[in-house]
Image (cartoon, rainbow, N blue to C red):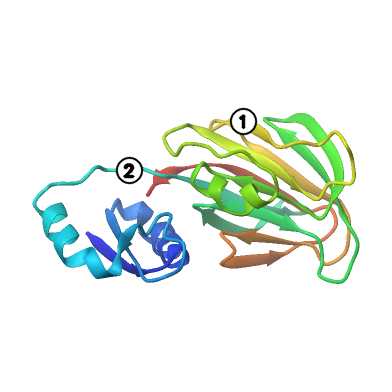
Amino acid sequence: LAIVVGGDGTMLGFGRQLAQYKVPLIGINQGRLGFITDIPLNTFPDTLKAMLRGEYEEDRRALMHAKVWRDGRCVYDALALNDVVVNRGATSGMVELRIEVDGRFVAKQRADGLIVATPTGSTAYSLSAGGPLMHPNLGGLVIAPIAPHTLSNRPIVLPDTSKISIEIVSGRDASANFDMQSLASLMMGDQITVEQSSHKV
């Protein structure tokens, strides 16, 4: 058992690290929001005693496995519990992205970026970008564009068996963030693949 004291960001970090070991996590909220670290700090002694007696409900959360490919080689490999975000550069204009799902073309869009979120991450950045709220027990992934330069691009909910591929068509200084805690710099022609991980938190 791991007892995680902090905010949701702390839980995201330890969730990714411990998922492969199947270690259960209890989150005690010392941060602001507490969506996934949901036990208040001032009540944790009584709550924790009850949980250790077996008074709890297990909640399994899906993880995504993402890779950055360059010239046929994997140059970055990461897990994400909330979201994978492809962003434009800080000082440059929009980024142009080509999106495929399971090898089929879905969209080519110019935008500030793109979010791929789990149901857990649907309450985070994806929500701010206009994406739907998904119950954590649902099996699915959300694709939500960030400020797209079109009237027709809308968030899409996909099955959790989907393999998503995002290619950088144009745009300088683009990057990919994984739970906003690790970052990969991207070049033109890079591909980011995202699929559900075999591990759960």
129 with respect to 179 (left or right): right
Q: Quadrant of residue 162?
A: top right
Q: Which mark is residue 177?
A: none
Residue at numbered disc 1: 158
Q: Quadrant of residue 34?
A: bottom left
Give x and y (percent) for residue 165.
Answer: 71, 41
Q: Please name the amino acid that badge 2 sits on.
A: Asp
Mark pair 1, 2: CA separation? 21 Å
Give x and y (percent) for residue 87.
Answer: 75, 59
Q: Mark 1 touching mark 2, by CB under 8 A?
A: no
First in sequence, mark 1 or 2: give its number.
2
Q: SS for tag 1?
A: strand
Q: Which mark is residue 59?
A: 2
Identify the residue at horizontal 29%, vertical 69% (top origin). Answer: 41
Identify the residue at horizontal 56%, vertical 59% (top origin). Answer: 179
Name the foreground residue: 156 vs 183. 156
Identify the residue at horizontal 79%, vertical 47% (top origin). Answer: 167
Mark 2, other Cα within 10 Å: few <14 / some 14–19 / many ≥20: few
Number of disc labels: 2
Give x and y (percent) for residue 126.
Answer: 64, 48
195 with respect to 6 (left or right): right
Name the foreground residue: 46 vs 36. 46
Q: SS for tag 2?
A: loop
Q: Quadrant of residue 136?
A: top left
Give x and y (percent) for residue 201.
Answer: 37, 49
Q: Quick one: which residue is furthest to the front in this view?
A: 42
Identify the residue at horizontal 37%, vertical 53% (top origin). Answer: 19
Q: Tell me the mark number nearer the camera, choosing from 1 and 2.
A: 2
Q: Is residue 78 above or below residue 130?
A: below
- Quarter of the image with the N terminus in it: bottom left
Q: Is residue 179 above or below residue 155?
A: below
Q: Is residue 52 above or below residue 105?
A: below
